[in-house]
Amino acid sequence: MKLIIISGLSGSGKSIALNVLEDLHYYCIDNLPAAMLPALADQLLSSGSRDHEHIAVGIDARNTPADLADFSSILKTLRSRQLDVQILFLEADNATLIKRFSETRRRHPLSNDEVPLSEAIIQERSLLEPIAGEADLIMDTSRTNIHQLRELIHSRINNDDSSQLSLLFESFGFKQGIPVDADFVFDVRCIPNPHWEPRLRRLTGCDSAVAEFLEQHDDAINMFEDIRDFLEKWIPRFEADNRSYMTVAVGCTGGQHRSVYMVEKLAAWFREQRPGILHRHRELS
């Protein structure tokens, strides 16, 4: 039986994640007390129903602080049942969360007349830290809209072989900040910048003219080979440690040309070597 625990900050997209998993025929339960997870697992295992082979459970800050603080022990108990347990944790930066709550006019579950929204978000981060620390996959939704989040969750979770590493290559611009959910971050700002070529400025790293320009420079070719060789050496070590998800972020100044080109090239290379390869261009979305 596969059990996915969905957690994260209020306003980060937990409900969307559960809806996506429900569409993938998971049996979904929202806002279950964390202490009841072992009992739920025992009940479903004992029933032997094939309808409950894939379960998704939402756990959030409405749990008691004691249960959240004890999450590591609860998780250890679950895994002693020989379940395939994975934890997806969603987050976003404070400014994005405040904007989302202001736009929807929803009340944060920890805010009240004495606790303003900004303070409630800080409290929630602290309460959920034990779950975030155990997460198999952390997703930052700050610059992701509803449709992009649905597609990203679907592509990362909907894997027929749960033992296969899901490897995401993501381009980004340092101007917009480093993705907080990245496992490896590579900086390619040292290679020639197509932005300064007037004919290339309006294009992106997905365009052949940009790729041809960069591949005229040894630095771009050497950078690709060095990143490729590094990942080929170390990815198998993470797989041997039963890692299910990995995100490799590649950044340039604006996230339009160099990082996009590099992610396209890396994804194409690794897609020929292994399944489970995804790619995303954060600033092009």
Image: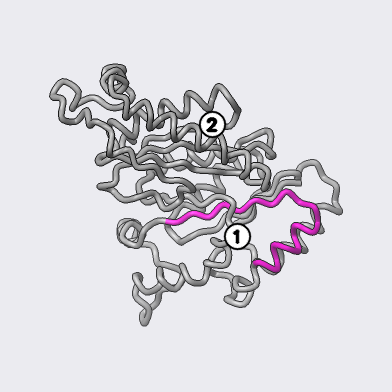
Out of 246 and 122, give the one closest to the viewer: 246
Which quarter of the picture shows residue 35? Answer: bottom right
Magenta run includes residue 229: no
Residue drawn at the location 29% of the way across and 42% of the way down: 173
Residue drawn at the location 51% of the way across and 52% of the way down: 138
Image height of 45 relative to 265, above or below: below
Out of 111 and 79, give the one closest to the viewer: 79
The picture places residue 188, in percent across and down from the top left corner, at: 32, 38
Answer with left or right where residue 60 lies relative to residue 266. right
Dot 2: within a 10 Å radius of its alpha carbon, few (fewer than 14), some, or many (20 or more) residues? many
Question: From this viewpoint, which residue is outermost toward the left?
Answer: 198
Residue picked out by circle 2: 277
Residue drawn at the location 70% of the way across and 68% of the way down: 73
Say which element carries label 2: strand
The picture places residue 163, in percent across and down from the top left corner, at: 69, 39
Say which element carries label 1: loop
